[in-house]
Image: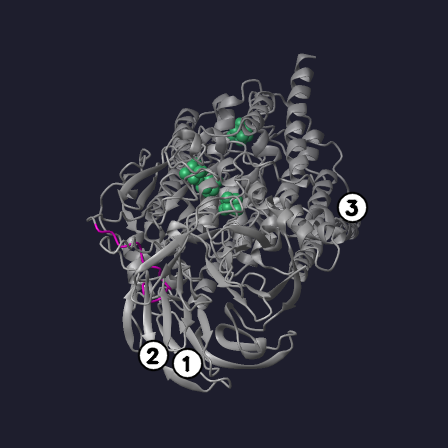
Amino acid sequence: MRRIKSIPAKGLKTPAGTTARTFILTFFSVLFSTAMAVRRFPKPEFETNYIQPSTQIPVPRAELLAYLDVFVLLVSLSIVTWLILKKRSRLWVFAMSVFSLAYFGFYREGCVCSIGAIQNVSLALFDNTFVLPLSVLLFFILPLVFTAFFGRTFCAAVCPFGAMQDFFAFKPQALSSRLNTVLGILPYLYLGLAVLFAATGTDFIICRYDPFVGIFRFNASFGMFLFSGILLLSGVFIARPYCRFLCPYGVLLNWTSRFSRRHLTITPKECIQCRLCEHSCPYDAIEVPVTSKSPESRPVRVRKMMILTVFVPFIVLVFGYAGSRMQDTLAGVDSRVKLAKEVMALSGKQDAGYGMQDAGYKMQDDSYEIKAYKASGKTESQVYSEASAVVKKFYIGGWLFGGFIGLAIALMIGGRIMPVYRTDYVTSKGRCFSCLRCVDYCPVKS
Amino acid sequence: MPNRREFLNTLMRGGILAALGLLSVSLVLRSRDKNSCSNGFACSSCGKSQGCSLPAALEARQTVWQLDPSKCIQCGRCATNCVMTPSAVKCTHAYAMCGYCDLCGGYLKPGTKTLDTAAEHQLCPTNALKRKFIEDPFFEYTVDEQLCIGCGKCVKGCSAFGNGSLQLQVRHDRCKNCNECSIARSCPSQAFSRVPANKPSLLKSFGKESLEEAGRKGELNA
Amino acid sequence: MKQKIFIITGLVLLVGVIAIMLADLFSSKKADKANPYDYKMGELRKTDITCNGYIEQLTIKPALEEIHAVACGSGDRIYVAGKNGLEIYQVNGKPDGNFRFEGVASCMALDKKGRIFIGMQDHVEVFDQLGKPCNKWKSISTESLLTCIALTDSYVYLADAGKKIVYRYDMNGRLINRIGEKDPQKNVPGFIIPSPYFDLGIGKKGELWVANTGRHSLEQFSSDGALNSAWGEASMSADGFCGCCNPSHFAFLSDGSFVTSEKGIERVKIYSPQGKYVCMVAPPSAFVEGTKGLDLAVDSKDRIIVLDPEKKQVRIFVKK
Ligand code: SF4
Ligand code: SF4
Ligand code: SF4
Ligand code: SF4
């Protein structure tokens, strides 16, 4: 594509920070270079020396800037990780979260974020016509790689969603461990649905229900603002509600972080059991010591283990079956299936034969979906076969989705019944956001 | 005991990292196979079998949202469903297709016989379409993008009664390039798709072939 | 106590958020809110059904990939031409032969000997009844877009929407003169052809009529290019031609009346030889919205043959 001149688009508002976009593509020149290729109908012959204006097509934000975003992500991840593990300074971490909120939130206006990138990656895996931009792939991968080594430093101060909610945690309340576990299932459901809908090409539900993007852009419908407002309000009492009980990326980070190599510790040296940090974590991510008097005997442990080995596959299968039974409900979200339903309703009513007169009048009452279907020239059977292909995908998808949820629940139950012993106050590597609040409470300094 | 635990940890970590690596490699390489571009970065639109410079290839891999005017049925959702108010979709005038008609189907309300520019005779709800006399009997029509809300009313009039030179397009100086365009989600005619960022327009011209198709065949690079 | 209230408040709000999401995702309500910016084309299309004096008698479904031109030959046989080929039908709609050629036929006419003249974008090709090429004229210009061809006993008239001009050729493809160039002295206003629809026809007395679509009129020229008369006016209602540029096609009944077709508001109508609106043959509701290029032909029994490129049908209308 030719970039003709570097004149700014006249009359077009150029948003701040987008001066690199002021190239203009000229439709006119394109048209002439293809004059042979397309059947072109000549413009009127003007007698005055009127010069036909060229159609201006503003060029998108220079896409190499997307790689700048990746670079900023990499640098801020590194800085935050260093601040957490070496400097151990809550204040600096806080400062970084302000930066991230400003850059990834208000300047980059949310898109693309690591959370949403889950869907791009899933879609790319299942639809090979979809080209995954490298920047999106890196947004997905980089935080996970850092987490595998250093814990969820991404959540601490790089993710703009986390930063946003962190500021609102005014009166965090401790939830019981049971409540934490039960609500902890929600992110698995969200992740499962998000991947399912993305992989089937139905929708990107993480983006659809993105609670903060409207705020980042200062531009949202009233409903969206209300939605964000409610979530932030609940975050006043339940700190970081999205991160803990919704965020699908959090599931991946949680499991990666459990195996991290060098996770933040509350105390730089030995824990002295002073209990000062016990209530310092707004996210209930501090594990208190469990010093059971009578450790379970080996046979008991083995028996529990054996019960679990039978129980886990059973639960997975049961949930998988339940998921496959939800095929219709899940597929009903897809617009292709919705269309097929409408077309069916429509054809059910219509008489065969000429009838065009009537049909012509009915068209006014039709939905736009039906109008578009009529205009597209698709046949009825084409619509049905497209829809049935989608429904089939949801049958398999339903099994996988259900099985995944079953596995999550089984592991959670397993985690609760298997015995734990610990003598010190430690962070839960999976759930800790490395925010450093607890560190300030620890009297032991290095 | 701690040693065994640590070993398991390392093993799992290694597994996770390997999985991530495999995922990235397969996603990057698969595009290479499909598009036979020597740089290995899919430029779905280019059609050239030769490679291009790395920056160009990287850029071509990025995508933006665009709507295909030949599928659009002007349902009005482009005006109402964009995350931006007013919408990032605007009417774009392909002058080269315009007949410069006196009785412009996109400009005048149907049934208007008196050809004055009084607001009540204009089809556009925001009077964003401007009419300028060129010479008898030709008039030039321009879209004032500050006013246009992308409702598509003029587009419908123009495609029904005129040449279809007025077309809706996502204007990328306003578009936020949402990960999933919220208009795409509700567009009844599935007119929205991700297009390569270096070919962001799908304006149609005369004939069945769109410019985009011509571009895919490589004619634009001639 | 206070703590409990806080937790419950937080939880209720959180559950509320989740409920909103689920309800929105799985609700089956249609997204189709009324469009506040709707262009109510339906109102325009609804008009004039009362004067419908014709019914559709026969529908032919050609197998061609695209159809663009229809003509009527000897024995009232129907010729349909389009992309890469031509099909012939008997008066009752039975197939009666076909042949293929390279290119997209945009218009067609038959001479007394049964030779078929086909206009293809920028040139004319002549075939015999079996599809044997007889002649291929050379390209007029790269900007040409032939949209109509009509024959008298000794001349070929071509309408070129690209150059916005009418040519008179002899039977062998030699240009004789150009008709309709803007000429204030001769009082010829010139053709305004804003869209690629530009039709002409030979009236019952052998006179040349041209559709000056941008002026919404039919103009009658003598063969040397003098403008003799014109009629027509712009109107969305049935008595005039709608939109920016119409009629897109026209043909003649045996009494010299005009049959016209329009795009925008798709309709086929009859006008008296003096240009007075008579009646509606096919109302907008008979066509798919957005249909363009309704080519027309009339056979010896005054059946009106309409080519519907959108439905890919040849539709024959007769008086009730
Ligand atoms: S760093 Fe401490 S306070 Fe912060 S989330 Fe982790 S355990 Fe909780
Ligand atoms: S939503 Fe789709 S059909 Fe509706 S106006 Fe936009 S592009 Fe056209
Ligand atoms: S009618 Fe709608 S789309 Fe057309 S210029 Fe006006 S606001 Fe824009
Ligand atoms: S991508 Fe976002 S900003 Fe752009 S047109 Fe779609 S909804 Fe509007």
How did the renderer colour the structure? Answer: one colour
Q: Quick check: C236 above or below B163?
A: above
Identify the residue under disc 1: C126
Q: Judge if badges 3 and 2 mark residues of a common chain.
A: no
Quadrant location of the N terminus of chain C in the rendered image: top right
Q: What kind of residue is marked 2?
A: Trp
Q: How many marks?
A: 3
Above or below C296: residue C115: below
Q: Quadrant of residue A58?
A: top left
Q: Helix or strand or loop: what does disc 1 sit on?
A: strand
- State the residue in front, C46 or C42: C46
User: In the displayed structure, would residue A322 be above or below residue A239?
Assistant: below
Q: Are marks 1 and 2 on the same chain?
A: yes
Q: Chain of mark 1?
A: C
Q: Residue at x 67, y 37 (%)?
A: C22
Q: Determine the residue located farthest toward the left in the rendered image.
A: A49
- x, y percent for residue B35: 42, 66
Residue at left offset 67%, top offset 48%: A338
Instruction: Please identify the residue farthest to the top as the structure is shown.
Output: C2
Q: Chain of mark 2?
A: C
The residue stretch that appears in magenta: A35-47
Q: Amino acid at mark 3?
A: Lys
Q: Which residue is mark 3?
A: A304
Residue at disc 2, secondary structure: loop
- Kind of residue at disc 1: Val
Horizontal arrangement in the rendering, residue A177 relative to residue C290 (left or right): right
Callout 3: CB less than 8 Å from ligand 1:
no
Front residue of A140 and A366: A366
In the image shown, does C37 or A436 lie closer to the viewer? Answer: C37
Contact (Cβ within 8 Å) of mark 1 with mark 2: yes
Q: What residue is pinned by disc 2?
A: C137
The span from disc 1 to disc 2 (Cα, nearest Å) is 8 Å
